[in-house]
Amino acid sequence: MTLFGPEDVLGPPRERQALPAGAVHLPGWLSLPEQARLSAEFQMWARGPVPLRAAALPNGGRMSVRTVCLGWHWQPYRYTRTADDVNGQQVLPFPDWLGDLAKAVVREACGATAARTYRPDAALVNHYDAHARMGMHQDKDERTDAPVVSLSVGDSCVFRFGNAQGRGKPHTDVRLESGDAFVFGGPSRLAYHGVPKIFPGTAPEGCGLARGRLNITVRATGMP
Ligand SMILES: O=C(O)CCC(=O)C(=O)O
Ligand SMILES: [Fe+2]
């Protein structure tokens, strides 16, 4: 007889939730050491050559999330080689190991055939403080239909996953926790999604992030 099963330490295992076709949530996909590595890399990415910044919006406002990009620079709403809205520098290259990590997620979520042709070339790395939000939007600046792979580290959040028709219902609220992966591809590739809430102080010990939430979306831009 074992005295303590994993549920006693970690709480009940989280089941995969029913989601629209093409959307897959992989709870606990990353180990704590993998989460800590992403946090450590983030600290370096945030220093530049293009620093972490709250992107300026065409309406004159700024995003509440702060973002640093790899491979291609993203600004609302396009990809460019140089960060012309920040300091004109070229962003850091997209790391092969991050592409391999995302490919493994695609293999699990979408199958071996999808993984074979998956060639990501950019990542948007977002940091949320306790008050940051992301409104409902589509990821539609990419010129490919490759799935988007999202990796989360640090504080938990509500990730609202909707439909491709508009910002309204139906939508599903998923709690994304440190180490979770989420994929949206196929019929859900252009689904609206957003982050209405962060749960401060919920990051697990050992994930490497002192405060806030890190989210990395790996993408295939289709840029030449
Ligand atoms: O933070 C998240 O989970 C989602 C981020 C997102 O939707 C984006 O960067 O486009
Ligand atoms: Fe997005």
Image: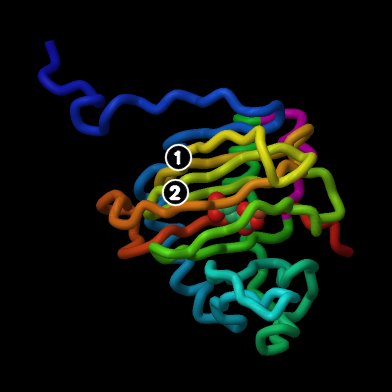
User: Label 2, label 1: how many angstroms apart (C-alpha)?
Assistant: 6 Å
Give the residue pinned by disc 1. 175
Name the kind of residue labelled 2 in the image: Cys
Q: Tell me the quarter of the picture where residue 18 sits.
A: top right
Question: Furthest-right residue in view?
Answer: 224
Give the residue pinned by disc 2. 157
Question: Where residue 52 sits in the image (x, y, percent)?
Answer: 54, 76
Q: Nearer the viewer, residue 207 or 65?
A: 65
Q: Nearer the viewer, residue 177 or 132?
A: 132
Label pair 2/1, CB-CB below 8 angstroms: yes
Q: Is residue 97 visible?
A: no
Q: Residue at x 35, y 47 (%)?
A: 32
The numbered mark, 2 or 1, whose residue comes first in the sequence reads 2
Q: Which residues are magenta?
A: 110-120
Question: Where residue 5 sits in the image (x, y, percent)?
Answer: 20, 21
Name the kind of residue labelled 1 in the image: Arg
Q: Is residue 128 left or right of residue 203?
A: right
Up the image or down, 153 lies above or below 109; here it is below
Q: Residue at x 78, y 32 (%)?
A: 187
Up the image or down, 93 lies above or below 102; here it is below
Is label 2 within 8 A of ligand 1 (CB to nearest ligand atom)?
yes
Q: Residue at x 61, y 57 (%)?
A: 135
2 drawn magenta: no
Up the image or down, 109 lies above or below 49; here it is above
Give the structural element (helix, strand or loop) at label 2: strand
Residue density around tag 1, few if under 14, some if 14–19, many if 20 or more, within 10 Å: some
Q: Is residue 85 left or right of residue 154?
A: right
